[in-house]
Image (cartoon, grey):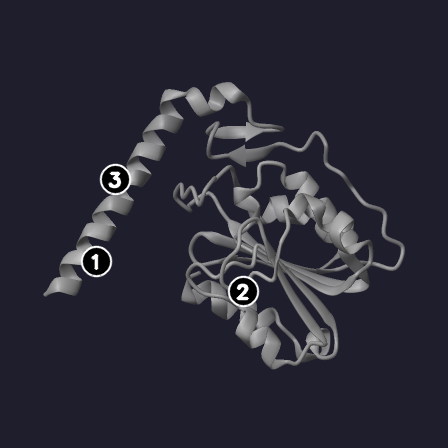
Amino acid sequence: MTINCLLALAIQLRREDIEGKRILEVGSQDVNGSIRPLAESYKPCEYIGVDIVKGKNVDLVCDSGNLITAFGRESFDMVISTSLLEHVKDWRQAIHNMKGVCKTGGTILVTSCSMRFPYHGYPYDFWRFETDDLKNIFSDCKIFALQKVPSNLVLITVKKPDHFAENYFLDYELYSIVANKKVKDIAAKDFRSLYFKKIVLKSHITNFMVGATNYICSRL
């Protein structure tokens, strides 16, 4: 997580939304930074971090598509998800579950990658969101903040309204870094395309060069 992303998230976190409240972080594993220490400094009554694998800041292994099953509807006062949605193939189900476990009047805070973010398969990378996408996807909630985070992330903060009527966006087309175009869903053939093979290879080469550079610097 970049410094810019952490700063943008910090601005969105308000003590009154957290203190004494139940907080759920979806995709909570700390890979390169976490907003959790700041959120916990506001003394929530409970802070639960979930991810698909065990790791730092992961309290429970749970898929983003199973939140309602795991916790029940209207279970949390605030739902936080940072840099998760681009890695979830069924983004609609993930967002449906985040909205479902958020209480009426509760807050949902989401960041994700925009078009300028390069491919990063940890372990998968499927989608790119722009501010218009988040505005549409969360149009069934009251939007309080919607912005680009320099230079390749987007952020939205919303409140779940009293008379919530969920939009499911079954036909919504979103840009897929796998298909290299806007699609409703990713097809199996997209993973076999020359374009996708090239960006995966480029990612592997970049990661190797960064790792080699870090190793050499550590030995100097």
Q: Quadrant of the C terminus?
A: bottom left
Sequence-first disc among 3 and 2? 2
Tell me whether the residue at label 3 lies in contact with that at label 2, contact meaning CB atoms closer than 8 angstroms. no
**Residue to which mark 1 is pinned:** 214
Q: Secondary structure at mark 1?
A: helix
Q: Secondary structure at mark 3?
A: helix
Place of residue 112 in the rendered image (x, y in percent of width and height, measured from the top left):
54, 51
Name the front one of labels 3 and 2.
2
Between the residue at mark 3 and the residue at mark 1, the CA separation in whole angstroms equals 14 Å
Between the residue at mark 3 and the residue at mark 2, the CA separation in whole angstroms equals 29 Å
Place of residue 207 in the rendered image (x, y in percent of width and height, measured from the top left):
28, 46
Place of residue 79 in the rendered image (x, y in percent of width and height, measured from the top left):
68, 61
Image position of 96 with respect to 109: above or below: above
Q: Residue furthest left?
A: 220
Residue 205 shows in the view: yes
The structure residue drawn at horizontal position 53% and vertical position 50%, both measured from the top left corner, is 53
The structure residue drawn at horizontal position 74% and vertical position 73%, both measured from the top left corner, is 21
Crowd rating for badge 2 (residues with CA inside 10 Å; few <14, some 14–19, many 20+): some
Q: Quadrant of residue 109?
A: bottom right
Pick the residue in front: 138 or 67.
Answer: 67
Sequence-first disc among 1 and 2? 2
The amino acid sitting under disc 3 is Ile
**Residue to which mark 3 is pinned:** 205
Report whether 113 appears left or right of 218. Answer: right
The amino acid sitting under disc 1 is Asn
Report whether 54 appears left or right of 137. Answer: left
**Residue to which mark 2 is pinned:** 57
